[in-house]
Amino acid sequence: MTDLIKRLDRAFNPKTVAVVGDKRAMGYMWLNCMSTFGGKVYSVQVDPDEIPGIEAMGVPNYKSVLEIPGEIDYVLCAVPRPVAPRIIADCVRKKVGAVALFTSGFAETETEEGIATQEQITQLAREGDLLLIGPNCMGVYNRRRGVRHSPDQPAGDAGSVGFISQSGTHCINFSLVGAVQGVKCSKTVSFGNAVILDAPDYLDYLAEDAETEVIAMYIEGVKDGRRFLGSLRRAARRKPVVVWKGGLTRAGARAVYSHTASLATAPAVWDAAMRQAGAVQTDSLDETIDAVKALVYARPTTGARMGLIAMTGGQSVVITDSFEREGLEVPLLTAASYEKLSGFFNIIGGSYRNPLDAGGTIGMGFLPGNLQKLFDILEEDGNVDAVAMEVGASFIARRLRQNPALLDSMVDILAAHRERSAKPFIAICHPGHVEDVMADIRSRLVERGIAVFGGFEAGARALRRAIGYWRFRAGLD
Amino acid sequence: MTDLIKRLDRAFNPKTVAVVGDKRAMGYMWLNCMSTFGGKVYSVQVDPDEIPGIEAMGVPNYKSVLEIPGEIDYVLCAVPRPVAPRIIADCVRKKVGAVALFTSGFAETETEEGIATQEQITQLAREGDLLLIGPNCMGVYNRRRGVRHSPDQPAGDAGSVGFISQSGTHCINFSLVGAVQGVKCSKTVSFGNAVILDAPDYLDYLAEDAETEVIAMYIEGVKDGRRFLGSLRRAARRKPVVVWKGGLTRAGARAVYSHTASLATAPAVWDAAMRQAGAVQTDSLDETIDAVKALVYARPTTGARMGLIAMTGGQSVVITDSFEREGLEVPLLTAASYEKLSGFFNIIGGSYRNPLDAGGTIGMGFLPGNLQKLFDILEEDGNVDAVAMEVGASFIARRLRQNPALLDSMVDILAAHRERSAKPFIAICHPGHVEDVMADIRSRLVERGIAVFGGFEAGARALRRAIGYWRFRAGLD
């Protein structure tokens, strides 16, 4: 473990936190974020109108970082821009573990003052050997320790997915939307303009972090391409790294400059570099979360031959098109499978050549014995590498929820299959017209460790990306 | 109006309906579907165990179609396969307006008996000049008249979107999922194996139907390509036609054969034919609904230069990438616009080059005056053809719902802009981690006639497709 990684480990796992500049007008957002933090929290605020409100929250307030007793592992600084240099200087003198600078209005504004102030704080941090996260960022989130950058984020238990983001919004959304879908974050960081600490530092850290099994990132620009790709390559050899690049289009490049003053990369160059490094590429928040789900919850496979189960003929066609369009195969099954299927499969309004149009056979989930038989047949079938199933077609979802015993039995069979099977299994739950019911069914499956996707294409794309990573790891592509 | 279209008009707008073969084990699904029908409903059921249950619903039951007094405009037949030929023969003798045969197990099973029975009913219908819809289908849905094929479908008011589908699931899902998102169906038909009436017949009918403004369809196979393309071309010259083709992949082609015994078309041939006919092509239910929303609710435009508004820097980048990736442009604004924007736009944590990173300027929707200014500037800007806006970022959605007055004012401004603007306007509401809150905000916007999409890519793709259609209509592509 390098010295820098040790220092980052202190910042990501703080025992003491100071929030500088929180106030009523922000709804005490930052102090609320720390309400789940098990360690000691201090506030720094000089405005006499603000101090009583902060103290009423039970947080001791000081006029300066320097006045806080003892060591400070992590400082979140939300002061107005002109005050930022003074706080940075204080943090240097206090030798704090790290500072995340929420304050924005620097180089990304393309104004003289913004650029000059950014240079000033960069120099202060560099000369003072200060770990500076940002500016123009949301800092770190450690789910286990309850250090958060959104009061909505879950806290207290462990997670396994790290996220590194040049955008605060995407960083927060990844953890919040991911949480709904079963993605538990270990540690995330929003790092904005990256004047001192940059993506490679966080990558190196999360690559070594034992509780982080999958790394995802949102990146707008790379300052030192060689260094970034080196870190990425090393990380991807140890664990999956999903990279979502913003600003790959022409106008998108203009937008990233306005956002984090990042310079764009040519799309073809970026794509080639990512492939070589073994990164999994995505284009949106949803795709990133989906790819992570497939990597975390579906067993690794290097084969791409799908066994598909849908509940009606129309959905059987569409699930098949979706997986083939993503480059996965939907092969014929073995003769042995067809012999077994012919013994019990209901072909009136159904078929079993693969896809399995199985609504009439498993009674929309109400005949768990037959569903189990289908799983067993696909498990033994040598032509099938992975299984995807449409779960809870919207027109039966209500009936499933009205009859909790049936839903329980379906969830149990899916969870047991997922547990026992050597092949990846994913479920597709389209929200349909009963979004609340389907959200309920989804969360039941998610709790049992099943990768659930909101549509066929989304599931196919995510699984294709996961398979691509496992093939890279196996030296196959 | 041809004779066939007049006859189809009778079937789609029946005054009398007979349901043949409904039963308790199906939850009286078909009679429940007709509970919203304003005309006269009859049942035909011979099983003495089933008749009391049907009569208890207040539906008069007969032993045969022939015994029903008066004319029957539409028959829904759900009998077991071996009984189907007898019912078809009775319907011929009764001279009913049309029969939809829900019964399945015909050619799509690839069994001798299935194929023979399909031939038998086809011959009976052809010789008897009977309008046969299906078999292996769900028949028609007329929202206004309350003739339904799912008890969940809305009824009583008028709609403007027709749907023609070879799959019952997709037909029902289109109406149900569409209804949640503001798509109101006029008339839809699920037509399964299409032994007598086929896609071109329904297309011809909906092309002439005055209340149908947009037609969408899910199609698995075309029997007479020349006739289909002729109907499609004629329809697309009058109103937008969105075509979702199932089975364009290799295994998908196998699946459509198992589903509706349809033969596949080579993807490149299909694509060329669709372009030539001026059809809007889609690949999934969600894409089809999205394209329809853009065609129904966003003003027609042949220009593709976007003005984009997002609430944070990260989202500004991603909305821009999404629209450019779909082939739309995100141009710089005019000098006049920049001058106006520089007067009030907050560039600390924001920017206005286009995209407009406007969270700090419109206060996440809480400063309606500034939002109005942005709309006015984009309206006047000669570089902008259409406007897309991120609405209700998930982290402020709860606050918006907690403060109904703020939400009201935001909805009012958006609705007024949409009403007044000569340019298409679309809203993007990602469900985020507060799916119920966002569903609520979405339905508020949908009620006001705004096209709302669940993600940036989805919105961009839908608008690109709509623009493509309007360019076709203008003779530009």
Image: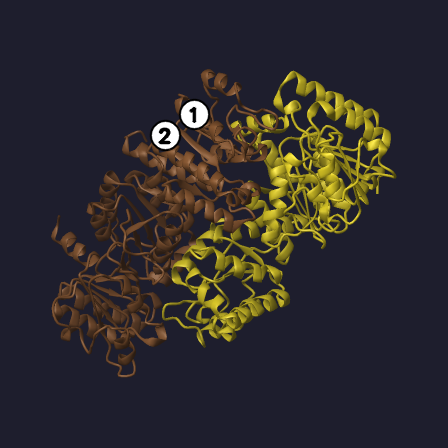
Chain colours: A brown, B yellow
Q: Which residue type carries mark 1?
A: Leu
- Are there few (<14), some (14-19), or many (20+) residues within 10 Å of tag 1? many
Residue B103 x, y percent position in the rendering? 68, 30
User: Residue A118's image quarter?
Assistant: bottom left
Q: Which residue type carries mark 2?
A: Lys
Residue A376 x, y percent position in the rendering? 42, 25
User: Residue A425's image quarter?
Assistant: top left
Determine which residue is flagged by label 1: A378
Q: On what subunit does the disc labeled 1 rest?
A: A
- Are there few (<14), some (14-19), or many (20+) residues within 10 Å of tag 2? many
Determine which residue is flagged by label 2: A423
Q: Is residue B341 left or right of residue A126?
A: right
Residue A427 x, y percent position in the rendering? 44, 38
Q: Are marks 1 and 2 on the same chain?
A: yes
Question: Closer to the camera, B233 or B393?
Answer: B393
Residue B326: in sight, yes or no?
A: yes
Q: Is residue A469 left or right of residue A18?
A: right
The reply to whether discs 1 and 2 touch (Cβ–Cβ < 8 Å) is yes
Helix, strand or loop at label 2? It is loop
User: Residue B432's image quarter?
Assistant: bottom left
Q: On what subunit does the disc labeled 2 rest?
A: A
Question: Closer to the camera, A405 or B326?
Answer: A405
